[in-house]
Amino acid sequence: MTAPVLQPDIAIIGGGIAGLWTLCQLRNAGYQAVLFEQEALGSYQTIGSQGMIHGGIKYALSGALSGSSETISNMPAVWRECLAGRGKVDLQGCEVLSEDFYLWSHTGLTSRVGSFFASKLLRGRVDRLTPSEYPPVLANPAFKGQAYRLIDLVLDVPSLITTLANQASDAIFKIDWDESSLENDNGMAVIRTPVAEVRPAQLILSAGAGNEALVQALGGSEPAMQRRPLQQILVKHEYPEPFYGHCTGASASPRLTVSSHRTAAGEPVWYLGGDLSTEGADWEPEKLINLAKRELDELLPWIDFGHCEWRSIRLDRGEPRQSALLRPDSAYVGPVDTTENALVAWPTKLTLSPDLGNEVEQALASRDMRPGPVCDLAALSALGRPPIAQPLWDTLFA
């Protein structure tokens, strides 16, 4: 029996934050969209995120706004609209871990950075705290630095994935690339599965670092991809207070970033990033864990963490290629050079997911794409549904 041919408006490959957000935003805009994921929804880069929705201040620690910080300055407000159910994507039900994010200095900020944080330019985005306003982690007489509250917020990433997936569960399918294929048929991208042939008006590749292989499957070489590796540290401990903050260092990026989580058994875990994770990306885990221990001892010496267990996780950030492997400043959407109907999408960071959704909509409009007739996706149900990725603090400490 010949497999049916399905012609949805949009087919998306990749079920991380980029694919899920784009799927929901396009469906809300009236497009018939379907998503394929080969593993668990949110695997790798998404589940490895600390969940920070930030406005770019962490890129302004040199005392000046960069292109990146200007691009994302309104992102916390956009996410809060979505969390309230008023944005292009409805995030009601997503768990917010913290409405506050802190920035602290180990000793004191340079006069340039301090003056910049106090400037009218950052009014309403950075508030210097008095000792009575310090979060519990910093409320100790031994703390001699400075502390600020940022407009950033922190989301529980597994909850975010679940919230998005539940909204579009009827359009998300598992795909096995040993049995299925992505092909270039005379300049048109086609997905062939055992149960149906999918010929979308537009294909969107949103598989993070996996986009490179998908572009190659279409015979393409552009857009080119870069990988920026990092290695983050998780420590399970007995200190009860949660904390979400950046510590300033000698560079323009945070010396250490801390987010707090709990295992399924309720055990506290701190997830550590910042310069620690980028400078030690290629180190042996034991070496980086030892540095993380020294960092916590030096920066927060008054905290008794009790019995600790340490783990590391290596992640590859897939992004559009930049000169000198620099960090991209904004979300990216670009055409595959060998097809008429394929786009590659990278949000470049979690907080820019709404920006990516808007970029995709603009790219579709520039191609004169409009929502078409309803496409019956029932044939795809035989493929099954992908699960949701498990939190790192559960899998690594299992």
Image (cartoon, grey):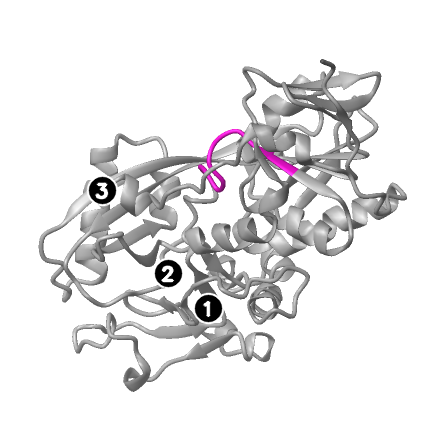
Q: Residues within 10 Å of mark 2 (few under 14, many from 20)?
A: many
Of badges 2 and 3, nearer the viewer stands: 3
Percent from the top left, x then y, of residue 43?
A: 45, 38
Q: Residues within 10 Å of mark 1 (few under 14, many from 20)?
A: some
Earlier in the chain: of badge 1 and badge 3, it is 1
Vertical position of residue 321 compared to residue 96: above or below: above
How much space separates mark 1 and mark 2, taking CA atoms? 10 Å
| In the image: residue 5, left or right of residue 237 | right
Dot 1 corresponds to which residue?
113
Q: Any magenta on residue 148?
A: no
Q: Secondary structure at mark 1?
A: helix
Dot 2 corresponds to which residue?
248
Task: Give the quadrant of the C terminus.
Answer: top left
Earlier in the chain: of badge 1 and badge 2, it is 1
| In the image: residue 41, left or right of residue 190 | left
Q: Amino acid at mark 2?
A: Thr
Dot 3 corresponds to which residue?
397
| Magenta-drawn segment | 35-44
Residue at 50 percent across and 78 percent down: it is 118
Q: Secondary structure at mark 2?
A: loop
Vertical position of residue 41 compared to residue 239: above or below: above
